[in-house]
Image (cartoon, helix red, strand yellow):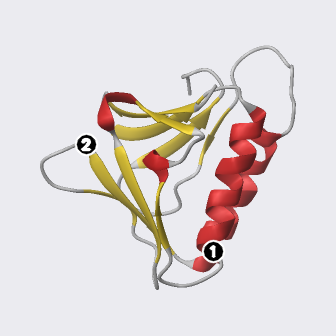
Amino acid sequence: MALKLEYIEIDEPLLLVWGKANDDYALFRQFALSLSEQQGSHKSLHSQNFIESIMNVQVYARNTLEDKGIVKRKNRPAFSWLLDTESWLWVADLIEPFSINDNSPGNRFQYINIAGQMDFVLSTSRGW
């Protein structure tokens, strides 16, 4: 079962990836690691097999010279996720614990955005 990608507007807007599929978190970690390999590399998160986009949310990830974080694009639920090489490695490290089988009760969550005005959260059950 794929991880869900969702845009939520409550008090402050945020992007949320949630689910319990450890294998999918491992693929998400590989996604971040692959972006760290070369400045200028880019991929769309929403088109990955391990992601199910809710309400057609689109996230375009890119390795850039400087961290800008999540930047909302115009006219649709689309975002750019702009981080430098070191930050993509940091994001991969933050995702890694979610790829390990953990049967503990309750929700686990982690903020994974290093820069910008919008938060990006991982969660095992849509809470944070």
Q: Is residue 94 left or right of residue 44?
A: right
In the picture of the structure, the residue carrying the numbered disc 2 is: 77
Which secondary structure, mark 1?
A: helix
Q: Position of residue 21 (x, y in %)?
A: 71, 29
Q: Is residue 91 in view from this perspective?
A: no
Q: Toward the viewer: 117 or 76?
A: 76
Q: CA distance from mark 2 to mark 1?
A: 25 Å
Query: Residue at the top extreme?
Result: 105
**Secondary element at tag 2:** loop
Q: Position of residue 115 (x, y in %)?
A: 46, 63
Three-letter amino acid code at the position of disc 2:
Pro
Q: Is residue 19 above or below residue 67?
A: above
Quadrant of the image for the N terminus?
A: top right
Residue 80 to residue 55: above or below? below
Q: In the image, what residue occupies the spot 48% across and 46% down?
A: 120
When the figure is inspected, residue 60 is found, relative to residue 123, above or below; the finding is below
- From the top left corner, tell me how far across and down residue 18 is, in percent: 57, 30
- Taking the image as shown, residue 45 lies to the left or right of residue 33, namely left
* Label of residue 36 in the image: 1
**Residue occupying the point 34% across, 40% down:** 57
Find residue 87 and report its image quarter.
Answer: bottom right
